[in-house]
Amino acid sequence: MTDYHYRIVNVFAEERLAGNPLAVFEDARGLDDATMQALALQFNLSETTFLLPSARATSSVRIFTPTNEMPFAGHPTLGSAYVVRALNNCGDALSLEMGAGIIPVTAAGDVFTLQANPAKARPARLTRDGLASLLGLVPGDLGEPALWISTGNEQLLVPLTSPDAVARCQPDPMLAQRHANEGGMVKVYVWAETGDEQIVARFFFSKHAGSIDEDPGTGSACANLGGWMIAAKSPLPLARLIYQGDRIGRPCRLHLKVDEAGKIFVAGRVIELGRGSVTL
């Protein structure tokens, strides 16, 4: 029997019992793919990560949802970086090897910042009426343009015309499944500007076929929002504070920056909540 130690951290958290929770296994050597997937289902958080040695970066990180492995996700990157820094005493600049490549991360106290991969964009190829039906809205609620964006995790980004439209959004699970990403996964991010460089956002995804769940704080979507703004020719540099998760009782605050060269940065506070071990 072997004990595998883990930590629970809250990412994008402004207070202890807020943010997006993450389980991080400190040393995943000896765990096969099926066991990692089973542990992610056991914890049943949006993601669970597993740290492994890397010859190319400070640590290798594998990210699992309860149903599949992901090449990149934002809050697992920042939460894993917190644990890697604590375990390795490597200072405030580190790198994580993921399926999407090497992700640089820096820290200032308990605030961690990742530099995302360059964004790739493609048209949504949905009519306004079709997109409105998918989201449970009316065409007048939609801004322009809706795009598929990926900085390592492709998502459908849909600008809305008001915070009220964001609040009213209720995606139809069956319609959403028809418009999954190229990996067959439903990932829809909606947002609206609220002024003063602030945004209110929600992220919807399918954890199980035929259902829609809402994520409290989505760093990959925040990075993709930076990619959307580049594609939409927004003036650079830019900075936004994103409010997400309040509607589901897990307030998250995400900081997005895009510099003059188009490099995308996502930051948030990480709070360690507890530690434990699993015996296998």
Image (spheres, rainbow, N blue to C red):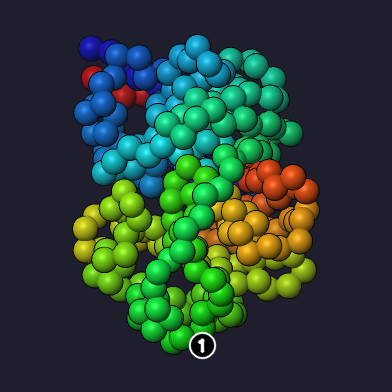
Look at 21% across and 63% down and name the residue there: 210
Residue nearest the observer in this picture, 198 or 161: 161
Look at 26% across and 34% down and name the residue there: 37
Label 1 secondary element: helix
Number of marks drawn:
1
In this rendering, would 92 be left or right of 142?
A: right
- Looking at numbered disc 1 in the image, what kind of residue is underneath it? Gly
Q: Is residue 28 above or below residue 7?
A: above
Q: Residue 162 appears in which quarter of the rendering?
A: bottom right
Look at 62% across and 54% down and name the residue there: 226
In this rendering, would 278 be left or right of 8?
A: left
Q: What quarter of the picture does the C terminus occupy?
A: top left
Residue nearest the observer in this picture, 55 or 269: 55
Label 1 crowd bin: few (<14), some (14–19), many (20+), radius 10 Å:
few
Q: x and y percent of residue 47 in the render?
A: 39, 41
Is residue 30 visible from the viewing direction of this image? yes
In this rendering, would 25 be left or right of 40?
A: right
In this rendering, would 198 be left or right of 62?
A: right
Residue nearest the observer in this picture, 64 or 252: 64
Q: x and y percent of residue 116 in the render?
A: 59, 41
Q: Is residue 268 above or below residue 34?
A: below
Q: Is residue 156 above or below residue 109?
A: below
Where is mark 1, residue-wise? 140
Q: x and y percent of residue 30 in the render?
A: 30, 14
Q: Residue 231 appears in which quarter of the rendering?
A: bottom right
